[in-house]
Amino acid sequence: MHRGEIVAVAILGVLLGLAALFWPSGTLLTVAIIFGSYLVASGIVRTTSAFVVPGLDPGMRWLTGILGLIVTIAGVLSLPNPFGSLIIIAFVGGIGWIARGIAGLVAGVRHTTSPRWFAFVGGGVSILAVIAMFLLPAFALRAFQFIGAMLLIALSVATLLTLPRSPKKAAKAAAA
């Protein structure tokens, strides 16, 4: 990447992080609308694939079509209530954490990781985080947003502070 592009992306990252911190409901609303639109688009693609992809057996064709319709309907239903779709995102994320927590606990029981206690702690924390997220999904989304905004700002500032020297300055330093 060109140095100017890196600077532009880093500055954009700082601005987006600040927007997420100081305009949280607007940021979450934007994410929700994008998510709902994505569901509609991906559902249409799945449904269309059920009809046009060659070589699918009938069972797979039906499954793909039905899943496509379900995803499309979920997207259409989430767009009028974007904040409701954020709750869906929290629950989907929670299901992933449950799987991660169970996998960690199983790894600890089966001695497939070292140290074992780390697998137990990681699995337990993951499952506890899911319980908290399911009980307080709106709070969990706000916490993710805050942490994400802080990380975006920190990484963008770090990028700006660790930029390599411009070729002209590097040549001057080498000549001196």
Image: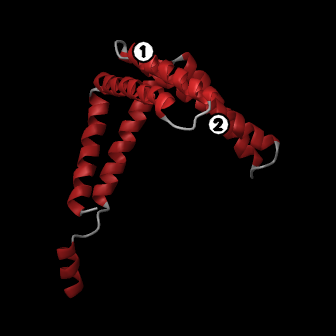
Asked if residue 27 lies left or right of residue 136, the reply is left
Most distant residue in the bottom direction: 175
Q: Amino acid at mark 1?
A: Gly
Of callouts 1 and 2, the N-terminal one: 1
Task: Tell me the crowding category of disc 1: few under 14, some 14 to 19, or many 20 or more residues within 10 angstroms, Cα based.
Answer: some
Q: Position of residue 37 (x, y in %)?
A: 35, 25
Q: Secondary structure at mark 1?
A: helix
Q: Secondary structure at mark 2?
A: helix
Most distant residue in the front direction: 54
Residue plotted at (32% across, 62% down): 162
Image quadrant where residue 146 sits: top left
Image quadrant where residue 105 sits: top right
Q: Nearer the viewer, residue 34 or 130?
A: 34
Does residue 125 appear anywhere in the picture? no
Instruction: Residue under label 2, please give it.
Output: 100
> How many numbered dots are placed on residues in this image?
2
Residue plotted at (39% across, 16% down): 76
Mark seen at residue 5: none
Q: Amino acid at mark 2?
A: Arg
In space, the residues marked 1 and 2 are separated at their CA atoms by 25 Å
Q: Position of residue 126 (x, y in %)?
A: 63, 33
Task: Tell me the crowding category of disc 2: few under 14, some 14 to 19, or many 20 or more residues within 10 angstroms, Cα based.
Answer: some
Judge whether 123 appears above or below 174 on screen: above
Asked if marks 1 and 2 touch (Cβ < 8 Å), the reply is: no
Does residue 107 appear anywhere in the picture? yes
Instruction: Residue under label 1, please give it.
Output: 84
**Colour basis:** secondary structure
